[in-house]
Image (cartoon, rainbow, N blue to C red):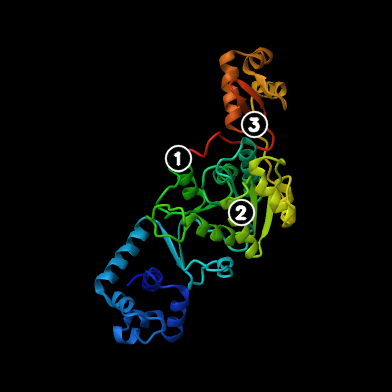
Amino acid sequence: MENDSRFLEFWLGTLDGVGLKRTARWREKLTLEQIYGAGKEQLMSLYGMTEKIASRMTDEGERERARGQWNKLRERGISYMSYYEEEYPERLRQIYSPPKHLYWKGKFPAEGIISISIVGARDCTCYGRDMARMFGYRLARAGVNVISGMARGIDGWAHQGALESGGDTFAVLGCGVEVCYPAEHQNLYRSIGRRGGLISELPPFMRAKSNFFPLRNRIISGLSDGILVVEARERSGSLITADAALDQGKDVFVVPGRIGDALSVGCNRLIRQGAVPVLSPDDILEYYGLSDTTIIEEKISSLAEKILDILGSMPVHRNRIVSEAGGDATAVMKELLSLKERGRIEEVSQGYFMRREGFEKGTDAPICE
């Protein structure tokens, strides 16, 4: 039967209540095909086998159900990988409690390419948003795999920046790959699935649960060479990911925060504990011996150039911009919106704009495609 060995990996890998230790011992005694073809009596001689598991493994109805699930994965374009397959990432083999299998849609992070995970607060500030987006953009543009968890806040903006650069970004989910969580990230979810990759150890239609997220953090850090923390409270999921990275021997980078800010406490504490503070994406690129040589200047209209000349590091009201730019008010507002969409400027409050450094293009919300 077509892809029979792949199906057998799926069948064994998705048996409920059976972990890597037991299946490893079984495979020392029997081949995968022999395990599938064994009768109940032979299975009962294997390490850690129970009558309940042996009955389930030899039940024809259960096998047909597994075959149906396997075919459904293929129909929906979902890839599957068992711990025992050669393609399983070596990075994950080395971590504590590696996932026994992975599902993904789109691409999977290639071995041999530097990967950086970017994590941080869900309730991030505008500063945190801009830093996550800038680092995601610049790192991905330099050929780095940008990995995060597609959560609200820092995660989403890191993916956003990477997508804007045209580089690769990967979301490790706290739900199945056929579920978008949070729901408001539907557009981001679709964009990552088309242009990057969605990854999970959970069954494809599994809904998100609070206890899934700490578990997925070990995969985020495990797939990465280093982790960048952008804004984190004293107790946060980002620090769990950072702790996992430290346990795995990974590099930990931190964007420093202002003393006294609640969202800076976790970051500054990591620095005190020995994490590497970074002031720009170049610090990370230089750390790994990489360079960003693909900066492309965008062509903008003469009216847009006038607007950029008017704006600086202090907010300017739109009425003044219209007056000084000397153009039609409608044309000026159109250029303001265009510059804002490309990330050149920022509307810091109603009607007040200022220049925004660090981006070549962008939008104000997660990618809509």
221 or 367, which is in the foreground? Answer: 221
Is residue 68 among what the camera can see?
Answer: yes
Q: Earlier in the sequence, mark 1 or mark 2?
A: 1
Query: Which amino acid type is marked by label 3?
Result: Arg
Is residue 139 among what the camera can see?
Answer: no
- Quadrant location of residue 165? top right
- 231 up-or-down from 286: above or below: above
Query: Which amino acid type is marked by label 2?
Result: Leu
Tag 1's secondary structure? helix
Tag 2's secondary structure? helix
88 or 317, which is in the foreground? Answer: 317
Tag 3's secondary structure? loop
Q: Position of residue 223 (x, y in %)?
A: 57, 61
Instruction: Give the distance between the C-alpha atoms of the residues marked 1 and 3, in whole angstroms.
Output: 25 Å
Q: Which residue is mark 1?
A: 184
**Residue neighbourhood size for the residue with mark 1, other residues' Cα within 10 Å, grouped as few (<14), some (14–19), many (≥20):** few
Q: Which residue is mark 2?
A: 239
**Residue neighbourhood size for the residue with mark 2, other residues' Cα within 10 Å, grouped as few (<14), some (14–19), many (≥20):** many
Residue found at x 33% / y 76%: 53
Q: Position of residue 131 (x, y in %)?
A: 65, 41
Q: Which residue is mark 3?
A: 344
- 190 up-or-down from 302: above or below: below
- 158 up-or-down from 43: above or below: above
92 or 22, which is in the foreground? Answer: 22
Residue found at x 56% / y 57%: 220
